[in-house]
């Protein structure tokens, strides 16, 4: 009958569960199969996986329904181990969802079942889990009750490690209740237990708690030392959550020391981890510390932003102490901004929350802030009333921090001894491990060396063979490229040769045409055109007449061009001297043609106009290159322009051509009319 009743209850649970989720998202097949299983353990695991699945889908209705269905699931026929696993897994989901009251009800029910079946290990585990839920609902007496119950059961089971962890929890509860001397005592007791059990992970937590105690005592140097010690221990244990909790606390100390920017940097580093892991409680604290730090450096917009996030996060986790601290910080921000009424309202809210959880340290702080807020609004009676509350609490909580500090310092040697012994044990273990593995390492080393030698020999042979093949391929490729280059150079030379020939044909045609023209002006125009064509022809001739594939410098071209111009204009070389000073410069085709035409045009103008009536004179041509710029200077000592005439006013084709060619080179050109005409042309070299 009992089995029938259990089966019927399981069936009804499944029906209720199936009905509750039918209207929402369809579960994956693997989870649905577990839920439909006849075995209670599989059914329970399926429900837990369904809760996680619905949480990921943000399906709050099905999350709530599945929580209820699991809570009603009968685990009495499950094995002891399976029941513990399922209950604690369900408790973890409730903890992460901040459903403290549901967790209390469920765990208390399972404690009764565990005691009835005389399963003391499960009872101890469930009492231990209840500690978290009562602590975060600020029921410290119930927290202590379940700690003591769990310790009593663990003593029967001789489980020193869990006793040490619970003793550390007692320190936290005593600290929250204001029993600071007890808190110090419990911390050192937990350290002694961790020292005996060699539990390095929990030792790091104890360092963190010691840092908290010294923080309360306003001994920030000692507090920083223990926070940094806990940070180092967490890093050694590869506990990332612990590392960032310690870093956040170090940031708090820097906040108290007014190292605001350093505190902000540390809190942001910690916050990045807390947000990535969705650690709401830790996020709430980090937001609060960031708000205070930004307030300290007078960045009130950032302070308000993080204060809002802090309040939102603590409201989600139902952590009322953090919520009270958030409203207290909000009151301070509003007061700084002279928003006095808003400051008062926030302080009232903080005081109400602090009073509801009987957290006297926060009540004292919020009473002081209320006194300040009422005083700023001119409400002296109310200000005095809250100042009196603050002073009364300060006097009642005045436990002489120096006495507590001295007591803590007396006990410090235990921490140092525990740290030393753990390090010594670690070193001994490392030495023993080294000795045990020495022979094996030598054997492995010899084997590796032999294998490496063989591999190196094989690799050497392969590399030599590949190099031989690559060398042959490279030689073939070079031969092919060289052949193609020669063909292309031949084609290019042929092009230049043909262009030169075509230009000469055009020049010859113009020469023939002049024989039939009687107009002197037209003949002069055709003569100028022939000189320009001849100038371009010379450039192409210099490009295809290379010696051993080496292009002649542009200066060689000028040395040929100038005598041809003097001859073309029938100038007496004894009267007009051409002084040429040229650097050895190579120009590409895009520069050579406009530059050659420029020289042709300027020198032609000088030969035609600078020395009328057969006067003596000289023309200076200077071509140089310096710091990536090419400079062409052409000057004559002839008659120059009339006083009223400048290069800009010249409208002849020759002067227009000079300006156009200078623009083509993107050159700066200056023309000076002083004892003759001087051209100074400068452009950036692109060759």
Image (cartoon, rainbow, N blue to C red):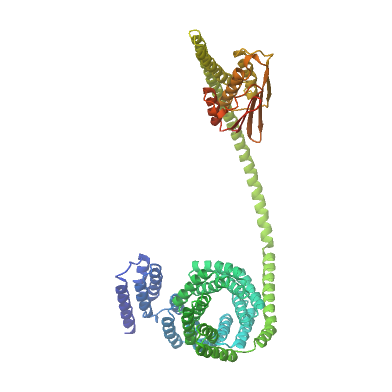
Left or right: 446 as drawn, with respect to 537: right
Nearest the eye: 671 or 387: 671
Give the number of callouts. 0
Give the quadrant of the N terminus: bottom left
Q: Residue 652's x, y, as percent? A: 52, 23
Residue 143 vertical position relative to residue 330 in the rendered view, above or below: below
Residue ranking furthest to the front: 644
Q: Residue 631's x, y, as percent? A: 64, 30
Nearest the eye: 400 or 598: 598
Residue 238 seen in the current view:
no
Left or right: 157 as drawn, with respect to 638: left
- The image quadrant of residue 438 is bottom right
- The image quadrant of residue 573 is top right
Residue depicted at 54% across the width and 28% down the height:
649
- The image quadrant of residue 677 is top right
Give the quadrant of the C terminus: top right
Q: Residue 162's x, y, as percent? A: 56, 81
Nearest the eye: 337 or 130: 337
Q: Residue 453's x, y, as percent? A: 66, 47
Residue 502 seen in the current view:
yes
């Amino acid at each position: 009958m009992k089995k029938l009743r259990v089966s019927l209850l399981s069936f009804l649970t499944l029906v209720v569960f199936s009905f509750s989720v039918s209207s929402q998202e369809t579960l994956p097949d693997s989870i649905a199969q577990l839920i439909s299983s006849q075995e209670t353990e599989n059914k329970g695991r399926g429900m837990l996986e369904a809760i996680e699945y619905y949480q990921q889908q943000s399906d709050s209705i099905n999350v709530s329904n599945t929580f209820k269905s699991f809570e009603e699931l009968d685990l009495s026929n499950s094995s002891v181990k399976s029941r513990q696993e399922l209950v604690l897994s369900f408790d973890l989901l409730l903890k992460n969802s901040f459903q403290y009251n549901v967790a209390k009800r469920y765990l208390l029910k399972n404690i009764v079942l565990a005691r009835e079946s005389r399963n003391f290990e499960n009872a101890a585990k469930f009492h231990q889990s209840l500690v978290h839920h009562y602590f975060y609902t600020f029921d410290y007496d119930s927290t202590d009750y379940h700690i003591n119950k769990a310790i009593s059961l663990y003593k029967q089971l001789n489980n020193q490690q869990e006793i040490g962890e619970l003793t550390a929890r007692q320190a936290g509860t005593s600290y929250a209740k204001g029993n600071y001397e007890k808190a110090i005592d419990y911390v050192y007791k937990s350290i002694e237990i961790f020292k005996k059990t060699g539990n390095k992970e929990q030792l790091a937590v104890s360092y963190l708690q010691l840092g908290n105690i010294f923080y309360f005592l306003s001994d920030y140097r000692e507090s920083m030392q223990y926070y940094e010690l806990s940070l180092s221990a967490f890093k050694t244990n590869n506990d990332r959550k612990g590392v960032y909790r310690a870093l956040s606390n170090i940031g708090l100390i820097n906040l108290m020391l007014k190292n605001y920017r350093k505190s902000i940097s540390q809190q942001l580093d910690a916050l990045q981890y807390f947000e990535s892991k969705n650690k709401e409680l830790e996020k709430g604290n980090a937001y609060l510390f960031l708000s205070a730090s930004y307030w300290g450096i007078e960045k009130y917009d950032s302070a308000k932003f993080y204060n809002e996030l802090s309040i939102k996060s603590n409201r989600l986790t139902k952590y009322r102490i953090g919520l009270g601290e958030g409203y207290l910080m909000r009151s301070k921000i509003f007061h700084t901004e002279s928003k006095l009424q808003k400051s008062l309202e926030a302080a009232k809210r903080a005081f109400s929350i602090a009073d509801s959880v009987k957290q006297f340290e926060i009540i004292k702080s919020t009473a002081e802030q209320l006194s300040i807020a009422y005083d700023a609004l001119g409400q002296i009676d109310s200000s005095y009333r809250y100042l009196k509350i603050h002073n009364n609490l300060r006097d009642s909580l005045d436990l002489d921090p120096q006495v507590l500090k001295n007591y803590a310092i007396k006990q410090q040697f235990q921490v140092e001894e525990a740290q030393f012994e753990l390090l010594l044990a670690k070193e001994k273990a490392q030495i023993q491990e080294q000795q045990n593995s020495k022979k094996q390492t030598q054997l492995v080393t010899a084997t590796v060396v032999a294998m490496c030698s063989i591999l190196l020999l094989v690799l050497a042979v392969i590399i030599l063979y590949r190099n031989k093949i690559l060398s042959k391929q490279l030689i073939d490729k070079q031969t092919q490229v060289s052949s193609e280059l020669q063909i292309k150079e031949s084609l290019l030379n042929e092009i230049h040769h043909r262009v030169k020939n075509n230009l000469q044909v055009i020049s010859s045609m113009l020469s023939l045409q002049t024989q039939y023209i009687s107009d002197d002006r037209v003949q002069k125009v055709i003569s100028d055109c022939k000189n320009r064509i001849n100038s371009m022809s010379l450039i192409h001739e210099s490009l295809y007449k290379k010696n051993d594939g080496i292009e002649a410098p542009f200066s060689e071209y000028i040395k040929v061009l100038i005598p041809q111009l003097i001859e073309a204009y029938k100038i007496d070389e004894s009267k007009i001297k051409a002084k040429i000073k040229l650097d050895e410069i190579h120009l590409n085709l895009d520069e050579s043609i406009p530059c050659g035409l420029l020289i042709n045009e300027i020198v032609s103008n000088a030969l035609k106009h600078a020395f009328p009536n057969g006067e003596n004179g000289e023309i200076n041509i200077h071509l140089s290159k310096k710091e990536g710029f090419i400079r062409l200077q052409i000057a004559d000592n002839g008659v120059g322009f009339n006083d009223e005439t400048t290069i800009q006013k010249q409208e002849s084709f020759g002067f227009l051509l000079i300006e156009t060619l200078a623009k083509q080179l993107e050159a700066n050109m200056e023309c000076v009319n002083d004892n003759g005409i001087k051209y100074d042309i400068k452009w950036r070299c692109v060759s």
